[in-house]
């Protein structure tokens, strides 16, 4: 009887500790980058496990562009109103962006090459060099 009570006690204690760790990783805001990385991993892992157990299937996005658009929408929704205003009111820095723009071109063998500026592209391939998007 004593062994059974010990086993029940340690099982109960283990479950309480796991619940405390779960709530810590889900609800406590991260204070350093390591905590943030572990928290993001655990929240993703936990949501996938819950989806597996309860059979909720998420629809697969049609393309990578759909995933990028969805993440962009959620990030803009998560920004505070003041951050949205400053983000929209910033003037576009076109001259600087063009000065630091990367270029892509294909060489004589047809392989894609990247260059940090148009001056780094060989003269023979400058006509076909395309600026990379931001």
Image (spheres, grey):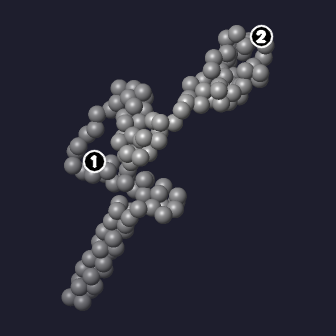
- Mark-to-mark CA distance, 2 and 1: 55 Å
Q: Nearer the viewer, residue 80 or 61?
A: 80
- Residue 103 point in image, percent of width and height: 66, 22
Residue at image location 44% in from the left, 45% down from the top: 83
Residue hosting label 2: 124
Residue at 35% from the left image edge and 42% from the top image edge: 77
Q: Residue 2: image x %, image y %?
A: 24, 89
Quadrant of residue 18 in the image? bottom left
User: What number is the disc on residue 52?
Assistant: 1
Residue drawn 51% across and 36% down? 90
In terms of secondary structure, where does tag 1 sit? Answer: helix
Residue 112 visible (yes or no): no
Q: Are marks 2 and 1 in contact (CB under 8 Å)?
A: no
Relative placement, left or right, of 31 versus 8 is right
- Counting from the top left corner in percent of width and height, residue 43 is at 37, 54
Label 1 packing within 10 angstroms: few (<14), some (14-19), many (20+): few
Quadrant location, the C terminus = top right
Q: Earlier in the sequence, mark 2 or mark 1?
A: 1
Task: Give the answer, above or below, for where 50 lies relative to 123.
Answer: below
Vertical side of 1 occupied by 82: above or below: above
Q: Residue at x 48, y 55 (%)?
A: 37
- Which x, y percent locates residue 74? 36, 40
Residue lying farthest to the bottom in this orientation:
2
Q: Is residue 36 above or below residue 117?
A: below
Regarding residue 60, the answer to whether it shows in the image is: yes
Quadrant containing the N terminus is bottom left
């Amino acid at each position: 009887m004593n062994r059974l009570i010990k086993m029940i006690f340690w099982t109960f204690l283990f479950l309480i500790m796991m619940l405390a760790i779960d709530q810590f990783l889900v609800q406590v805001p991260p204070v350093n980058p390591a905590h943030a990385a572990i928290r993001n991993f655990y929240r993703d892992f936990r949501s996938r496990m819950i989806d597996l157990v309860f059979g909720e299937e998420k629809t697969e996005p049609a393309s990578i562009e759909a995933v990028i658009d969805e993440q962009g929408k959620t990030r803009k929704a998560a920004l505070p109103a003041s951050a949205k205003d400053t983000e929209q009111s910033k003037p576009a820095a076109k001259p600087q962006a063009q000065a630091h723009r990367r270029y892509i071109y294909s060489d004589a063998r047809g392989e894609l090459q990247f260059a940090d500026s148009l001056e780094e592209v060989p003269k023979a391939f400058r006509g076909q060099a395309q600026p990379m998007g931001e």
